[in-house]
Amino acid sequence: MGLKRGFLFLLSLTLLVFGNIVTGQADDRLKTLVVAVNSDPANLEPGTNKAYPIGSEIILNVFDTLVAWTPPAFEEMEGRLAESWTVSPDGKEFTFKLRDGVKFHDGTDFNAEAVKFSFERTKEINPYMKANFGLISSIDVLGPLEVKITLTKAMPVFLSILAQPQAAVVSPAAVKKFGDDFNVNPVGTGPFKFVSYTPDTSVVLEANTDYFRGASKLSRIIFRVIPEASTRRLELENGGIDISQQNGQLYSIPVEDIKAFNKNPDVDVIEVPSQIFRQFEFNNSHPDSPVNDVRVRKAMAYAIDYDGLLNGILGGTASRVYGPLPTNSWAFNPAMKERAFSYDPDKAKQLLAEAGYKPGDLKFKLYSFQGNLWGSICTFLQANFADVGIDVTVAQTEFPIYRNLHTTGQHEIAMDGRQPWYNDPDAHITIGYYSPLADSAMTFRMPEDAELDGLILKAQATVDFEERKELYFQIQEMIMDRVPAAYLFSNKIIVFKRSNVKGLVINSAPPLNEYWSVYKE
């Protein structure tokens, strides 16, 4: 009896320990969110970030901005690091009262000096923010928790600018400590703390248990770099990842997989309308390319079968874009529907002949993002151009390399798009078409154009809503005259997630997720 009783005790102890281990592992999985991304984040801090989508999403989870769009509708602004704010009658002065008791992840205090340091640093080192932060004439610390920002002219969208990842507030002490390496050692006040970065592999964050809005129910987030769409699909089906973002179709699980996932009870497909759009783009400042001739640009725009692209390759997941703004922008000019290019191969051939080109004379390399979807789009366009005598080869390129080719102008034609980082037409127009910003980001690389540039700056600074709207109507007409691109489609934001992931709220401008509210069941 003694031996039997001893054996039963050991057996029960073993089962208890094993059960605790299993329970612990299960609990750990429930508190860990794994997000699949397609490439290295490239940049993890606000001061030098130039709208890298993956890095920007990480920034929004590690750092805080003064203000943010209020979920779930994202139609009004709310305070984050700012408790309240006032705007002067002339629209030039923004005064913020800041939250007390907030600390950076390194234990140092958040205060007005940190805001001043962060914004002045970003203004100095980030060319992407030049058009916006360049308007800041002074930043005055009025007290430990009060700061005033003065602009050189009124800018109605300035609060929206301050909700961007690039306007997040950094730890001055950490910047001093890490120097240039702050990019891979980011320190903010956000809901998650940076733990580690392994290039081309992963970024690991852990919950900030002292977060001023309350600690997340998650213990950690792991951003896993998984370049292949097929692997992301398998990992999602098997539970190896919790979320696979389509990221505005910069990369995606193939369109046909949406139907399959809709039948899978373990996977949810979230589809949200967006102001994102994609275009076939010309390098409008290339010194010696045939695309300098507007007749060539028009010919290539007429060569595209827009309806075939939307109904075939995209399978109904996108809608037509007619010009520089999406149709759901409040500043969209309805006249663009009449001005938009239509599929007319005969007109394309006529224009090429007028420009002095015979079939086979024109040869281009079409640069594109990676992924099955983009490959299919490029192959479709390649066939369209071949039909009118233009030889196009496709070069799908990793995003950091592609972005460098684009921003340095080492291309003639490329696939690109606009992802608005705040809910205003300025988000599409200024960064895309204002010529002084041509090489600051992935823009249309517009040549110097005093008339267009002046109108863009006027629209940016006009306070009256109806007057601004009319200015953007004029800007769209002027841009269409210049044919900087063939505008293709506006896609939905589509996010695939495991069904046990709860609390995820999708924002469309910018199309980046905050995970503070997310939990797993």
Image: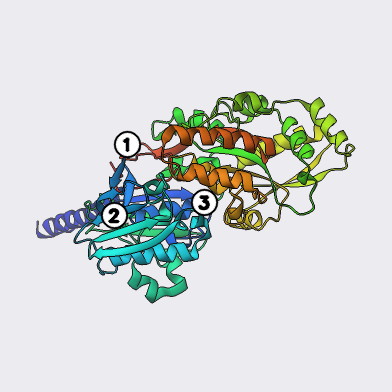
Q: Where is 366 relative to 42, above or below?
A: above
Q: Nearer the viewer, residue 318 or 499?
A: 318
* Image location (x, y in percent) of residue 362: 84, 43
Direction from residue 153 to residue 367 in the image, left or right: right
Q: How far from the left and from the top, in percent, is residue 269?
A: 43, 33
Looking at numbered disc 3 in the image, what kind of residue is underneath it?
A: Ile
For label 1, count other residues whose C-alpha is less than 10 Å away and answer few (under 14), some (14-19) or many (20+): few
Looking at the rendered image, the disc whose residue lies closer to the viewer, 3 or 2, is: 2
Q: Work out how far the residue at label 1 is from the one at label 2, CA to CA, in angstroms.
A: 26 Å
Residue 488's place in the image compared with 103, above or below, is above
Residue identified by numbered label 1:
72
Disc on res. 391: none
Q: Which mark is residue 95?
A: 2
Q: CA distance from mark 3 to mark 1?
A: 29 Å
- What residue is shown with label 3? 226
Instruction: Please name whichever residue, 484 or 249, is drawn nearer the observer in this view of the structure.
Output: 484
**Which quadrant would the C terminus be assigned to in this image?**
top left
**Looking at numbered disc 1 in the image, what kind of residue is underneath it?**
Pro
